[in-house]
Amino acid sequence: MSVLSAGQKFREAVATEHPLQVVGAINANHALLAQRAGYKAIYLSGGGVAAGSLGLPDLGISN
């Protein structure tokens, strides 16, 4: 049985999904929800996670 690394899974998704949709998540819970919804690639940013934890708006768009 072969276990693929995260990098190998990403390269495979880039090669097979056209286009590859990458969704941003503000925390690990949202990333799990996106994974369950079928997204093949998800990104988290340290600043986004920290801001989401503090309840700050994303990029100041909503204020």
Image (cartoon, rainbow, N blue to C red):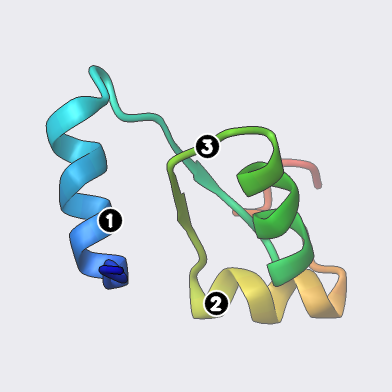
In the displayed structure, does residue 46 sit left or right of residue 13? right
Can you say whether 45 is above or below 12 in the image? Answer: below
Which residue occupies the extreme right position in the image? Answer: 55
Whether residues under marks 1 and 3 lie with C-beta atoms below 8 angstroms apart, the answer is no
In the displayed structure, does residue 5 sit left or right of residue 52? left
Which residue sits at x=84%, y=79%?
54
Q: Position of residue 12 (x, y in %)?
A: 19, 45
Q: Which mark is residue 47?
A: 2
Q: Residues within 10 Å of mark 1 (few under 14, many from 20)?
A: some
- SS for callout 1: helix
Q: Residues within 10 Å of mark 2 (few under 14, many from 20)?
A: few
Identified by mark 2, the residue type is: Gly
Q: Which residue is mark 3?
A: 39
Which residue occupies the extreme front position in the image? Answer: 1
**Closer to viewer: mark 2 or mark 3:** 3
Can you say whether 2 is above or below 24 in the image? Answer: below
Can you say whether 13 is above or below 26 in the image? Answer: above
Q: Which residue is mark 1?
A: 9
- Which residue occupies the foreground of this view, 34 or 8? 8
Task: Kindly report the distance in space between the C-alpha atoms of the residues bearing marks 1 and 2.
Answer: 25 Å
Q: Earlier in the sequence, mark 1 or mark 2?
A: 1
Identified by mark 1, the residue type is: Lys
- SS for callout 3: loop
Q: Which quarter shows the N terminus?
A: bottom left
Task: Kindly report the distance in space between the C-alpha atoms of the residues bearing marks 1 and 3.
Answer: 12 Å
